[in-house]
Image (cartoon, rainbow, N blue to C red):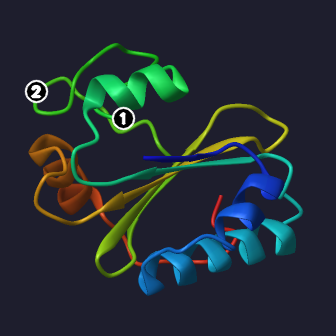
Amino acid sequence: MLSLPDAAAIRAALHQPLPARLHAILADELATAETCELQDLTYILVVQPGDTEEAIEQEIGWSPLVNPVEGTRFGTADFLPYWVAIEDLGGWYELIHAVSNDGFAYILLIEDAPGVSTDLLRMCRQYAEEAGVCGF
């Protein structure tokens, strides 16, 4: 799991050895955040094989599988999507969860790979949309 709470952390990650696809996605995320003037309001969490729901919740304070307002869990009949968007980036999913009126958002980049939570991948696949720019 990579936890990138601000633009400086994202820039630093881009200087580390990363798989080419992840590097390109992070570079695009940073460029989009800067274009939308949200670079200081963007927290990216990279979810990879082996990262558990509990570890994600410990890192950012919430589970992507639970609606933070309603308390309902993905897979139950009363679950309602709470995020701005889930986009299929080709091998990765992007879940955008805006949490304040100033534009602050968590962006979860979830690798579509064995070892990633099957429930999380199932949720992403069910709700994925095409990628856009400044869509929130």
Residue 100 image offset from top left, x and y in percent? 74, 31
Q: Is residue 31 above or below residue 86?
A: below
Q: Which residue is mark 2?
A: 77
Q: How many marks?
A: 2
Between residue 88 and residue 27, name the one nearer to us. 27
Query: For the point 36% across and 70% down, which residue is it?
Result: 129
Alpha carbon separation for disc pair 1 and 2: 17 Å
Q: Quadrant of the C terminus?
A: bottom right
Rendering coords of residue 53 (x, y %): 27, 30
Q: Is residue 38 above or below residue 59?
A: below
Which is nearer the eye, 79 or 46?
46
The amino acid at mark 2 is Ala
Circle number at residue 64:
1
- Horizontal arrangement in the rendering, residue 106 relative to residue 48 (left or right): right
Residue 63 on image: x %, y %: 37, 27
Q: Residues within 10 Å of mark 1 (few under 14, many from 20)?
A: many
